[in-house]
Image (spheres, rainbow, N blue to C red):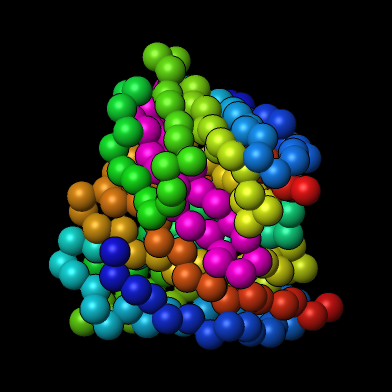
């Protein structure tokens, strides 16, 4: 699996949008971009995933660069419950398993 | 729909002992993967089972093994426990295990080796 690079930590104010960046310059054409988050004392939780086009769901939006070498997870209005470690992961089309990096620790300030 | 269930939630074992952890996937899911999470190494993939067959394996010693039953429930076993095996062990299930689908994680089993 190709590697990803994320900032170690980010901070946001409650009810403001948060943009979490991820670089994946060695991404291949069959790699899907997945985002998971892990709240304290819990297992990782699926957030969103995409291949080429931008994706939206009830939790977040995923913006994928045209060259696919970077992506951004967008939380439209951060809440205190969004404080977690966010992992950006690439999974190839053959279904190889997750390779987790250190992720971005998001703090949300009231 | 019930989520992924891991038992037990907490476990304390002594060096040299062996341990078996259990994972019940979401009903209908055929793929179960196991991960080890430690503060120093983060989340690391152990192995994946699909339809009772090991499909992928991470870079862990042979002391770590697993199996999957016909009802998709999975167990992992660690023999000759070492202090460094203390970790949170997570399992994840998905319908087919492909990269285009999401995986659902359990809350994990926290193993402490003393």
Task: Indicate the quadrant where residue A33 lies.
Answer: bottom left
* Residue at (63, 49) in percent of width and height: B82
State the image coordinates of residue B70 (x, y, percent, origin top left): 40, 14
State the image coordinates of residue A47 (x, y, percent, origin top left): 51, 57
Side (left or right) of A13 relative to A89: right
Q: Nearer the viewer, residue B93 or B77?
A: B77
* Residue at (77, 68) in percent of width and height: A80
Q: Nearer the viewer, residue B74 or A20?
A: B74
From which residue to which does the magenta span run?
Answer: B28-50
User: Which residue in the rendered view is the most extreme toward the top?
Assistant: B70
Task: Assess whether residue B46 is covered by the magenta stretch.
Answer: yes
Task: Indicate the quadrant where residue A106 lies.
Answer: bottom right
Relative to residue A8, is residue A75 depicted above or below? above
Relative to residue A7, is residue A102 depicted above or below? above
Whether residue B40 is visible, yes or no, is yes
Give the quadrant of the N terminus of chain B.
top right
Relative to residue A105, is residue B18 depicted above or below? above
């Amino acid at each position: 699996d190709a590697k990803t690079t994320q900032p170690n930590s980010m901070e946001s104010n409650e009810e403001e949008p948060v943009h979490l960046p991820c670089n994946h310059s060695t991404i291949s054409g069959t790699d899907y971009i997945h985002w998971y988050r892990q709240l304290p004392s819990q297992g990782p939780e699926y957030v969103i995933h995409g291949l080429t086009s931008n994706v939206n769901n009830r939790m977040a939006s995923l913006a994928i660069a045209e060259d696919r070498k970077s992506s951004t997870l967008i939380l439209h209005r951060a809440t205190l419950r969004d404080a977690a470690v966010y992992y950006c992961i690439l999974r190839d089309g053959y279904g190889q398993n997750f390779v987790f990096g250190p992720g971005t620790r998001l703090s949300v300030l009231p | 729909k019930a989520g992924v269930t891991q038992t037990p939630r907490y476990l304390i074992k002594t060096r040299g002992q062996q341990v078996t952890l259990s994972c019940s996937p979401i009903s209908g899911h055929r793929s179960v993967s196991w991960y080890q999470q430690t503060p120093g190494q983060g989340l690391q993939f152990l192995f994946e089972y699909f339809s009772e067959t090991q499909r992928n394996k991470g870079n862990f010693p042979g002391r770590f093994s697993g199996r999957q039953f016909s009802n998709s429930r999975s167990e992992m076993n660690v023999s000759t426990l070492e202090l460094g095996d203390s970790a949170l062990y997570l399992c994840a299930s998905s319908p087919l295990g492909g990269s285009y689908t999401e995986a659902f994680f359990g809350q994990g089993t926290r193993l402490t080796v003393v």
